Image: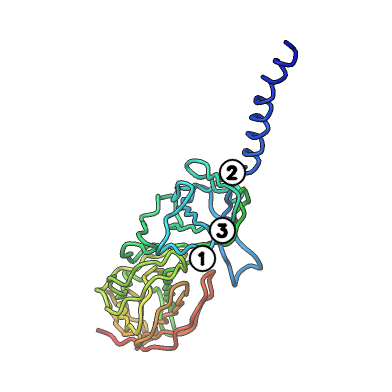
Amino acid sequence: MRMRTMLMAMIPVVVATCSCSKEERGTRVRETKFYASYNTNYTTKGENEFPQGNKAFVYCYNSGSLPTYSIPVAGTPKEAVAGVSGNLTTAGSVILPKGLYDFYAVSLNNTSTPEITFSSGLSQPLVNGKDYLWAKQSSVSEGSVVSFSFSHRAVGVELRINAGEGVDDINITSVKITPPLPGVNSVMDLQTGVIGMSTIKGSLTPVSLSGGKYFYIMLPAESLSMDVEVSLNAVIGGTAVTGRRYRATIPQQMYSGGILYAVNLTVNANTMSFNGSVIQDWTTQTIGDIILTED
C-alpha cells in the first residue's frame, strides 16, 4: 500500500516534466548572425568585403510585413559593427522564435553611428554629402546567417579636370556644383531603399578632391539643371594666368539614386569642356560634352 502511494505521487511529476520538454521543443529559439559586403556590379564579379569598423543599423520584421504598418521585432533596430571578414556584431543578440523574417540594414559607409531613423517605414529628410547604404534579406529562417549586400542609394558625381592642348602647369584651386536642395521628399523608404527626389537646385557647394578626382555625394533629383564653377591657375598659350574662373550649366536631367555620374573636364587654350566618363563601383551614367565659358 505504501509503495502504491509513492508511485501515484510520482506520476504528476513525470507528466509535468514531459510537458515542459515538449513546450521547449515547440518554442526553440536560435541566435541570428549577420554578414555584410558591398554590391559591386562593374569592377568585380562578386562582392567586396565591408570595411572593419563600419557601422550599420539592422531592422527585423516578420516576413511579408510592411515597415509602413508594422513594428520591428527582436528589439531592433540594433546598431551593428563590422569586424574581420565582414562579420556584423549587433549590440545585443537577435534571437527569434521559429519562423521567417525580413531583415533590413542602413549605413553611412563609415565608422559613425548612422544618422538616420525611421518612422512608419520612412526616414527623416536626408542631406547631401552622406553615402547612404541600404540592404535587404527576405524570408530568412530564425537562426540563419543574414548576408547583407549593401548598395549606394544616394547619387555620386565625379569630376576629373585635365589639361588640354596648349595648357600647362594646371593648378585647380576650387570646384563647386549646385546639388539638389533637400526637401520633404528627400526621405528613404526602408522597404525599397529608394530616396525620394528633390526638384530644387541648391547653392554652389565645394567639391572635395579625392584620389585625383573631385567627388561629391548628393541626394537624387528630378529634372534638375546643375551649375559647375571651376577656379584655376595655369600656363595657357605660354602665358601664366591666375584666378581664372569658369562656369557652365549641366542641362536639366534626372539624377537617380545608386548612379555615379562621372564627368571629365578638359581645359583647352580658349575653352573648358566636359567629355568622357569613368566607371566606378556605382552604376555609371555618362554626361555628354558641355562647354564651359569663362566668367
Q: Quadrant of residue 26?
A: top right
Which quadrant holds the C terminus? bottom left
Task: Tell me residue 38's x, y (percent).
Answer: 56, 61
Q: Which mark is residue 185?
A: none
**Residue at horizontal 57%, vertical 62%?**
138
Give the side of residue 270 with respect to residue 36, left or right: left
**Residue at horizontal 66%, vertical 68%?**
45
Instruction: Note whether 91 is above or below 260 in the view shown.
Output: above
- C-alpha separation, residue under disc 2 versus residue under disc 3: 17 Å
Nearest the camera: 105 or 272? 105
Nearest the camera: 7 or 277? 7
Instruction: Note whether 3 is above or below 197 in the view shown.
Output: above
**Residue at horizontal 36%, vertical 89%?**
291
The way the protein has been coloured in the rendering is: rainbow
Task: Tell me residue 277's x, y (percent).
Answer: 50, 80
Task: Tell me residue 114's x, y (percent).
Answer: 40, 54
Q: Earlier in the sequence, mark 2 or mark 1?
A: 2
Q: Secondary structure at mark 3?
A: strand
Amino acid type at image mark 2:
Glu
Q: Nearer the viewer, mark 2 or mark 1?
A: 2
Instruction: Note whether 55 is above or below 281 in the view shown.
Output: above
- C-alpha separation, residue under disc 1 versus residue under disc 3: 9 Å
- C-alpha separation, residue under disc 2 versus residue under disc 1: 26 Å
**Residue at horizontal 33%, vertical 66%?**
128
For disc 2, the marked residue is 31
For disc 1, the marked residue is 151
Q: Do the residues under discs 1 and 3 have CB atoms within 8 angstroms?
A: no
Q: Earlier in the sequence, mark 2 or mark 3?
A: 2
Q: Secondary structure at mark 1?
A: strand
For disc 3, the marked residue is 148
Which quadrant holds the N terminus? top right
